[in-house]
Image (cartoon, grey):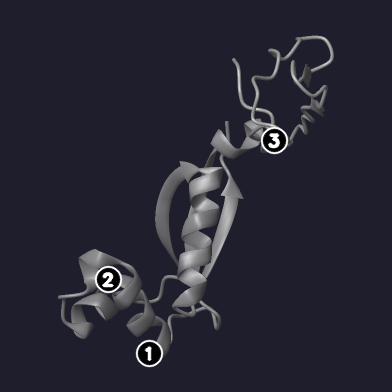
């Protein structure tokens, strides 16, 4: 690939693959292409795709009114249900199961739940 000399405008020689150096044929101006390698993202951790069990854990062993309201905002299927129906579903359960998900997605769910004031615990699956 040819390009003009920054000093005189004449054509520079093509870059050589070994030195990445180009010289102006008219004035002798030299240019060197500097390459800087930027490290890519780290490779994904194989554990991120392993399945884990996640659940909402209530602070006092039973769901408080505030946690029920937060759960209503956090879980779409409960948004339009009456509070009494949600209370009946949760009743005396010490936690609410959210299913089995890949570990990376479970951490995402955990972060989102935290924004609503909920505590999500992640547990290893039993083989």
Q: Which mark is residue 6?
A: 3
Residue 50 visible somewhere in the drawing: no
20 w.r.t. 5: above or below: above
Label 3 residue SS: loop
- Residue contact between numbered discs 3 and 2, judged by CB atoms under 8 Å: no
Q: CA distance from mark 3 to mark 1?
A: 72 Å
Q: Determine which quarter of the picture holds residue 91.
A: bottom left
Kindly identify which numbered label has been placed on residue 89.
Answer: 2
Per the image, label 1 sits on a secondary structure element best described as helix
Q: Which residue corresponds to the image point at 55% horizontal and 80% vertical from the top-left?
A: 59
Q: Are marks 2 and 1 in contact (CB under 8 Å)?
A: no
Residue at figure coordinates x 36%, y 75% from the top left: 71
The percent coordinates of residue 28 (x first, y second) are 83, 22
Residue that badge 1 annotates: 65
Neighbour tally class for label 1: few under 14, some 14-19, many 20 plus, Cα within 10 Å: few
Question: Measured along the vertical axis of the image, is residue 116 above or below residue 56?
Answer: below
Give the position of the C terminus as an image quadrant: top right
Please report whichever mark, 3 or 1, sits nearer to the chain's N-terminal start.
3
Q: Residue at x 70, y 36 (%)?
A: 42
Q: CA distance from mark 3 to mark 2?
A: 75 Å
Q: Position of residue 87 (x, y in %)?
A: 28, 80
């Amino acid at each position: 690939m040819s390009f003009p000399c920054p000093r005189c405008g004449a054509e520079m020689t093509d870059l050589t693959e070994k030195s990445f150096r180009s010289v102006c044929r008219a004035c002798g101006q030299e240019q060197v292409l500097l390459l800087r390698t930027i490290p890519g993202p780290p490779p994904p951790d194989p554990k991120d795709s392993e399945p884990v069990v996640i659940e909402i854990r209530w602070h006092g062993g039973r769901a408080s009114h505030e946690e029920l309201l937060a759960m209503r905002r956090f879980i779409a299927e409960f948004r339009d249900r009456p509070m009494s129906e949600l209370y009946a579903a949760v009743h005396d359960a010490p936690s609410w199961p959210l299913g089995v998900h890949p570990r990376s997605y479970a951490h995402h769910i955990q972060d989102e739940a935290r924004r609503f004031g909920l505590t999500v615990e992640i547990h290893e699956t039993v083989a």
